[in-house]
């Protein structure tokens, strides 16, 4: 006897509707936290049109990478300072009832032999879940943050993010993207450097590099050089040597259609000094375009001041005075390698890139998801 056929077998299965994800409330608050080699910084923001409005912010110099170059480990004192800062961040997240957030750690935690165990320690002490991101992710998010500053005339773009422990450089070809779509094509890089087939014009990454030298690690490397000007020159030359493997290194781009965007505390400090700001004003700094001659004059002024003079200079600030010359050395090396008439100053970076990526993916920005 043939086995009894189960009831309904062979019939078309009934369609089961997969519930669509609930749309995100456009009034939702988002948070992005960047734990770097020198600083712990966080933004809490709300979508507003195609941008976002900052509701709260936090920035503290925790010097997490102090001694890392010599020991290969994060020190107890550095970790303690960092956890104290993160407790403040957690209070802000609770206060604003933030549900959508991304909290990341970068170069110091990537390099430290106890970086992963430090993430576990942070979780136990603060309840915050931080992730150590790869250099490519860090570079990509820095690029996305700069999208609003990309000119419609730009065909070749170099984005430089000078951090505490590393410096990311991304070279992007926009020549095949219609001028009015160039900024949006950068925003779409929130999906990754290697884009999938898309109906939209795509920006093309020619090359990118993460140099394991930032303002803190470069300064620490040459800390034993007593002569101020000599130390600065050595830092600049050493950083330039690290760029030899970057494919656009030997090709000077045409000045027309080439744009460098610099994002870092170094670049914004140089801009604030150039403007003579008694008190820092982001609205005057972000998007400012400086000539190479203007940048050079500011750097030469820093050198003329010497270490003591820089400590007393109100434009530099306490948190930045010990790091400004290593940052300036990196900046000068870049302008030496790629002579250009102007550099666009970006008071934005990893945190802004995280926020744009999150909000764009959720479809809460006008014109998104990109």
Image (spheres, rainbow, N blue to C red):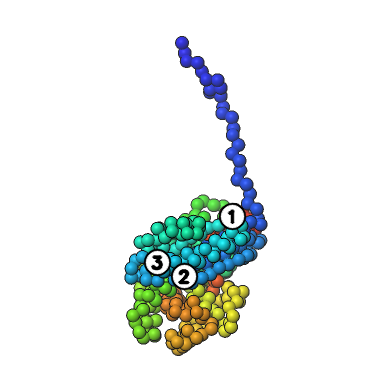
The label nearer to you, 2 versus 3, is 3
Residue under numbered circle 1: 99
Residue under numbered circle 3: 76
N-term-proximal mark, 2 vs 3: 2
Q: Nearer the viewer, residue 188 or 134?
A: 134
* Callouts 2 and 3 close, C-beta under 8 Å: no
Q: Position of residue 11 (x, y in %)?
A: 56, 24
Q: Position of residue 135 (x, y in %)?
A: 43, 62
**Whole-number angstrom distance, CA of label 3 to CA of label 1:** 31 Å
Q: Residue at x 47, y 13 (%)?
A: 2
Residue under numbered circle 2: 62
Q: Residues within 10 Å of mark 3 (few under 14, many from 20)?
A: few
* Image quadrant assignment for residue 364: bottom right
Q: Position of residue 210 (x, y in %)?
A: 41, 65
N-term-proximal mark, 3 vs 1: 3
Q: Residue extending furthest bottom?
A: 304
* Image quadrant assignment for residue 182: bottom right
Query: Which structural element holds mark 3?
Result: helix
Q: Residue at x 54, y 52 (%)?
A: 198
């Amino acid at each position: 006897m043939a086995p009894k056929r189960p009831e309904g077998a062979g019939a078309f299965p009934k369609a089961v509707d997969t519930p669509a994800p609930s749309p995100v409330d456009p009034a939702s608050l988002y948070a992005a936290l960047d734990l770097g080699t020198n600083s712990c910084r966080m933004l809490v923001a709300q979508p507003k049109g195609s941008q976002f409005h900052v509701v709260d912010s936090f920035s503290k110099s925790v010097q997490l990478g102090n001694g890392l170059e010599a020991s290969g480990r994060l020190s107890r004192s550095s970790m303690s300072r960092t956890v104290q800062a993160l407790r403040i961040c957690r209070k802000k997240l609770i206060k604003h009832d933030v549900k959508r957030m991304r909290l990341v750690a970068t170069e110091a935690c990537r390099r430290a032999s106890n970086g992963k165990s430090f993430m576990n320690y942070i979780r136990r002490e603060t309840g915050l879940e931080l992730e150590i991101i790869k250099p490519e992710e860090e570079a990509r998010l820095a690029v996305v943050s700069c999208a609003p500053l990309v000119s419609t005339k730009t065909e070749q773009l170099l984005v430089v993010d000078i951090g505490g422990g590393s410096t990311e450089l991304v070279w992007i070809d926009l020549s095949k993207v219609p001028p009015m779509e160039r900024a949006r094509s950068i925003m779409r890089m929130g999906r990754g450097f290697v884009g999938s087939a898309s109906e939209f014009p795509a920006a093309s990454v020619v090359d990118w590099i993460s140099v394991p030298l930032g303002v803190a690690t470069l300064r620490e490397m040459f800390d034993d050089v007593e002569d101020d000007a000599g130390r600065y020159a050595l830092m600049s030359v050493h950083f330039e040597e690290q760029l030899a493997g970057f494919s656009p290194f030997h090709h000077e781009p045409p000045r027309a259609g080439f744009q460098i965007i610099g994002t870092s505390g170094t670049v914004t400090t140089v801009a604030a000094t150039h403007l003579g700001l008694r008190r820092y004003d982001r609205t005057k700094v972000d998007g400012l375009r400086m000539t190479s001659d203007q940048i050079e004059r500011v750097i030469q002024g820093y050198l003329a001041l010497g270490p003591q003079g820089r400590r007393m200079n109100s434009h530099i600030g306490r948190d930045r005075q010990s790091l400004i010359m290593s940052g300036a050395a990196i900046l000068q090396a870049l302008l030496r390698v790629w002579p250009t008439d102007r550099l666009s100053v970006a008071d934005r970076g990893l945190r802004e890139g995280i926020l744009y990526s999150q909000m764009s993916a959720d479809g809460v920005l006008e014109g998104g998801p990109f």
